[in-house]
């Protein structure tokens, strides 16, 4: 077994379960659980770094006038906050969940390519360090917005190149992780688990992995063209040489829109696991959920230019992208209706995972509605690049992706650590996060409607009150996450808390609840025999 790292004669005797110890266990990790843990810790670290940048942004915007940072640094803060949160916090976070849960949920011994799995994690470290250290390079960190639009990118200092290199490395990591996930799901399921018997989380990740492989090379192409424009005399995006800055936007958003679904589909999967468990019912409309997820993935490729309604697009183009965007709202609504139908007449209890799941459905749906409003070309022309857009995507990314990860943590942590988290603290974390989040981002809708542009370090007096409220909310939200780490996560990692039973949630279904808590280092070394529904092991 590649996961057993001690080279004594007893590597293959009765106690398969001894994990390698010391630093080697983590540096040379090939076990999917260890790599999953590493991904989750990395993701949380980057989340804190990105959070600190966000708090600097909110501190600057607390009052009108230039307070703390100069406008150049402010632009760097908004740019790096976006890049670090998207590529350093959300995406690796979900890959951590995939690594931990997919082999457990499909009855596989490990991921298909264990060493590649290790490599795809360790690539994140230099990329993360490059992004963070770009603040200390001459001219400061990239300041072209997370979208890295030309011509701004052509005017940046050396940190831009470091940013591009970091993005390339992160992209390579994502592609390797995706290949690994696809091969694991398609080739390593326990006998009897057909595709249509897989848990929803596995389904959403299978579809997400295909999306990643499809669009990461597109981003790599866009930023490589930026690199050659900067250093090798090409003019892809420079009008002076016959190039077109709008071309960059098209290439970027052809990656960027599927990317936003890459960040939400695994969240849908987690919620689809949790809601049935606490409603004590089977998931309503499983087949329609699978088809809805697949159709979201396919439709995500034909909506990219709704980010570009103000670039002088012909009306025909505006209409096409507007209708396509309205169409993609349908499968998303199907999912929401299915979750609500699952809860309907269920005997629900509201432990922390369920609170986060219900919070997710409520707030994500609000974010979905503001997205539909922005999809209307005539409205978007007024709201483009205002705080309304910022409010919209934070409602779907924070209250979407992040809440789902919190829900997933509370749901599966007993299985990971072998101890129960403190329920009271979990509930404090939920209510604190929910209230602080809404205090932060709800006022931004009004700021946007009143015309406050995004990414500005200063603003006129009429926006002062709402900005002050948003800043206070932002700091409260950040504090809630520090509370979460020190008072919920650390105690469980140290093994403090009551011992978790094998199935801590009475109605939870799936193979992950068929192994002891904490999950042994090696599980399913021989493929398990499953019942007809493929959710229990028959001895």
Image (tube, helix red, strand yellow):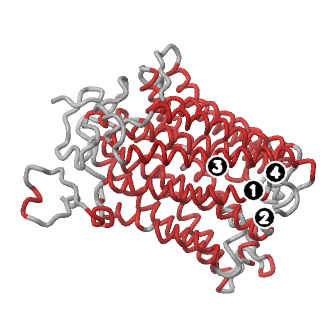
Q: Which class describes the residues within 10 Å of circle 1: few (<14), some (14-19), or many (20+)?
A: many
Q: Which residue is mark 1?
A: 59
Label 2 residue SS: loop
* Res 331 visible: no
Foreground tag (1 vs 3): 1
- Residues at marks 2 and 4, CA–CA distance in whole angstroms: 22 Å
Q: Residues within 10 Å of mark 4 (few under 14, many from 20)?
A: many
Is the residue marked by circle 2 packed among few (<14), some (14-19), or many (20+) residues within 10 Å? some
Q: Which residue is mark 4?
A: 386
Q: Earlier in the sequence, mark 1 or mark 4?
A: 1
Of labels 1 and 3, earlier in sequence is: 1
Residue under label 3, please give it: 302
Quadrant location of residue 470? top right
In the foreground, 415 or 527: 415
- The answer to the question of whether label 1 and label 2 lie on touching residues, with beta carbons closer than 8 A, is yes
Q: Which residue is tagged 2?
A: 68
Compute the Cα span from label 1 to label 4.
Answer: 19 Å
Determine contact: label 2, label 4, CB under 8 Å.
no
Mark found first going from the N terminus, 1 or 2: 1
Residue 379's spot in the image, x, y percent? 84, 42
Query: Tag 1, which secondary structure?
Result: helix
Q: Residue at x 68, y 55 (%)?
A: 55
Q: Judge whether 168 appears above or below 365 on screen.
A: below
Question: Where 89 falls versus 319 (above or below)?
Answer: below
Q: Is 351 left, or right, of 496 in this rendering?
A: right
The C terminus - image quarter: top left
Q: Are marks 1 and 4 in contact (CB under 8 Å)?
A: no
Q: CA distance from mark 1 to mark 2?
A: 8 Å
Q: Residue 159 at x, y = what percent?
A: 64, 77
Cβ–Cβ under 8 Å for marks 4 and 3: no
**Residue 239: image x %, image y %?**
80, 76
């Amino acid at each position: 077994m590649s996961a057993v790292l001690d080279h004594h004669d007893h590597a293959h005797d009765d106690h398969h379960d001894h994990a390698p110890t010391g630093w080697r266990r983590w540096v040379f990790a090939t076990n999917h659980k260890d790599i999953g843990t590493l991904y989750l810790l990395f993701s949380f670290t980057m989340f804190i770094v990105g959070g600190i940048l966000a708090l600097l942004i909110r501190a600057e915007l607390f009052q009108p006038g230039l307070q703390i940072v100069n406008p150049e640094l402010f632009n760097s803060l908004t740019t790096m906050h976006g890049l670090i949160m998207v590529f350093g916090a959300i995406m690796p976070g979900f890959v951590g969940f995939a690594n931990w849960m997919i082999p457990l949920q499909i009855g596989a011994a490990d991921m298909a390519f264990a060493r590649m799995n290790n490599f795809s994690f360790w690539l994140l470290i230099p990329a993360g360090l490059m992004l963070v250290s770009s603040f200390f390079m001459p001219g400061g960190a990239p300041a072209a917005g997370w979208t890295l639009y030309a011509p701004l990118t052509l005017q940046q200092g050396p940190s831009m190149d470091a940013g591009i290199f970091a993005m390339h490395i992160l992209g390579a990591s994502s592609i390797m992780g995706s290949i690994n996930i696809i091969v694991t799901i398609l080739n390593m399921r326990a006998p009897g688990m057909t595709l249509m018997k897989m848990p929803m989380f596995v389904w959403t990740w299978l579809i997400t992995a295909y999306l990643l492989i499809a669009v990461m090379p597109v981003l790599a192409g866009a930023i490589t063209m930026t690199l050659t424009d900067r250093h090798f005399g090409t003019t892809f995006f420079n009008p002076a040489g016959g190039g077109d800055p709008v071309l960059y936007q098209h290439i970027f958003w052809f990656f960027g829109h599927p990317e936003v679904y890459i960040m939400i589909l695994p969240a849908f999967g987690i919620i689809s696991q949790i809601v049935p468990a606490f409603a004590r019912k089977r998931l309503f409309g499983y087949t329609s959920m699978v088809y809805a997820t697949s159709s979201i993935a396919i439709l995500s490729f034909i909506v990219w230019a709704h980010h570009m309604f103000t670039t002088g697009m012909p009306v025909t183009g505006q209409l096409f992208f507007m209708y396509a965007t309205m169409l993609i709202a349908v499968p998303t609504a199907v999912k929401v209706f299915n979750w609500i139908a699952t809860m309907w007449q269920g005997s629900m209890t509201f432990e922390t995972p369920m609170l986060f799941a219900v919070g997710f459905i409520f707030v994500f749906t609000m974010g979905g509605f503001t997205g539909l409003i922005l999809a209307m070309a005539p409205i978007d022309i007024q709201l483009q690049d205002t705080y309304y857009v910022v409010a919209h995507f934070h409602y779907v990314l924070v209250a979407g992706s992040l809440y789902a990860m919190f829900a997933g943590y509370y749901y599966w942590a007993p299985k990971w650590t072998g101890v129960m988290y403190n329920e009271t603290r979990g509930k404090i974390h939920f209510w604190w996060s929910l209230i602080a989040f809404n205090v932060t981002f709800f006022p931004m809708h009004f700021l946007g409607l009143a015309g406050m542009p995004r990414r500005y370090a200063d603003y006129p007096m009429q926006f002062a009150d709402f900005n002050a409220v948003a800043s206070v909310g932002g700091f409260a939200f950040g504090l809630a996450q520090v509370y979460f780490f020190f008072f919920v996560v650390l105690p469980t990692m140290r093994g403090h808390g009551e011992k978790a039973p094998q199935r801590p949630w009475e109605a939870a279904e799936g193979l992950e609840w068929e192994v002891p808590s904490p999950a042994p280092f090696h599980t399913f070394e021989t493929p398990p025999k499953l019942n007809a529904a493929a959710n229990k092991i028959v001895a």
